[in-house]
Image (cartoon, grey):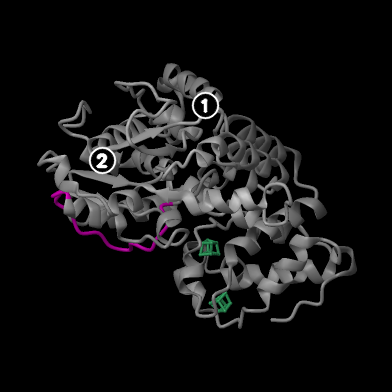
Amino acid sequence: MYVNLHSSFAKNAAAVEAAELIKSCVHCGFCNATCPTYQDLFDERDGPRGRIYLIKHLLESGGAGEATRTHLDRCLTCRSCETTCPSGVQYGRLADTGRELVEEVTDRPLAQRLIRRMVRWVFPYPKRVGLVLGLGRIFRPILPGAIRGQVPPKQSISSTARTEPTANRRMLVLGGCVQAAATPKTNDAARRVLLRLGIDLFEAPSAGCCGAVDYHLGAQKEGLMFVRRNIDAWWPEVERGVEAIVVTASGCGVMVKDYGELLKGDAEYAAKALRISELAKDLTEVLEGEDLGLLGKSASKERTAVHCPCTLSHGQQLDGSVQTILERAGVPLAATTEDHLCCGSAGTYSMLQPEISQRLLDRKLAALSVDAPEQIVTANIGCQLHLGAKSEVPVRHWIELLDTGSGGDHP
Ligand code: SF4
Ligand code: SF4
């Protein structure tokens, strides 16, 4: 598809890049077959091909209306379409640029602006998330059902995050934001499991949110401020030769792996960002090369259904990696269907598009329950909380299943 870029975007680097990316789309429509929102709404504009046309129109006309904003808002950014596309269209980057430009050229209603502001004010900051969750637990009995389910029980952990390494092999871990407040057990379990494998996992004290919350809500400049802050926080350890930067939430992992691309035009940070992306590893990639026999025969024996987050399967192309590790560790896996389908969490999507999100959640839980599992595991905090809100069986991060017999309190 050729884009005749509007003169107002001629000096806008993101718009110029988007016009280039659109060129590889041959408008075949294969992507609609695996797009959750197209499958839910059956409107061409709620599928990837239709959204690409809307972005093309925006780039050519220099403007957009409410309809364009609505259909881009409804996109989960699950990137299932990227996996399906035979032409290699980088839809995720197109969607981010399209959203940023839409924010510039349209006036979002005040109520929507306030909700988005609130989300961006709370979620990137663990203390604020902790405060909101604390209030949610106090007022749980009077909260509406859908919101009540989103408030997880408080998790206690047996150790605090170390900021100094103590073993020979050293890896940084991203503390993150929502996960740090809502499910601290995840990084706690990862720390213990890796220590049994001879790897010390530690945090850089001033690192935090990966930047994805702002970046994917059309506030890209603000999102990149978080990115630069993390690079500054990690860089001294990178110079000391840290082996990897481990990310236990796949939604954050896909963002950190993208730092190099996001800052490629920043003369000061481009080289550092690229190095950070090279060092970034999902937890499955770390365990993939390790001798899991060192963990002993202590993994969970409950029949387990695995939900692979879109950010792991489509974003990081690591589909099946959780299942492989759990099988190697001796965890019995339950069968599942519709594995390509997004659960509807998608970062802040479950709050901003609750109706579509809930329909996808119901469908996903049915697909995960066909073989009557005793528990569900996943690899991303958003999916974990979203599935856990309605699931009849416990929903955990998969690393907790390997954390038995080492001080972790999982059965
Ligand atoms: S599958 Fe790829 S090339 Fe075909 S319409 Fe979708 S994005 Fe375009
Ligand atoms: S990212 Fe997901 S929801 Fe968005 S267009 Fe692609 S497949 Fe559809």
Q: Nearer the viewer, residue 247 or 66?
A: 247
Task: Judge whether 368 appears above or below 61 on screen.
Answer: above
| Residue 141 x, y percent position in the rendering | 40, 21
| Label 2 crowd bin: few (<14), some (14–19), many (20+), radius 10 Å | some
Q: Residue 19 falls in which quadrant of the image?
A: bottom right
| Residue 162 x, y percent position in the rendering | 40, 25
Q: 150 left or right of 38?
A: left
Task: Judge whether 76 appears above or below 399 on screen.
Answer: below
The mark that comes first in sequence, 2 or 1, is: 1
User: Which residue appears at 60% of the width and 49% of the height?
Assistant: 273
Closer mark to the observer between disc 2 and disc 1: 1
Q: Residue 155 falls in which quadrant of the image?
A: top left
Q: Which residue is mark 2?
A: 392
Q: 68 left or right of 259?
A: right
Residues drawn in magenta = 329-343
Q: Amino acid at mark 1?
A: Pro
Q: Nearer the viewer, residue 118 or 141?
A: 118
Decide if residue 62 is in sight here.
Answer: yes
Q: Amino acid at mark 2?
A: Glu
Residue 205 tag number = 1
Q: Is residue 332 magenta?
A: yes
Q: From the image, which quarter does the N terminus lie in?
A: bottom right
What secondary structure is the stretch in magenta mostly built from?
loop
| Residue 190 x, y percent position in the rendering | 32, 37
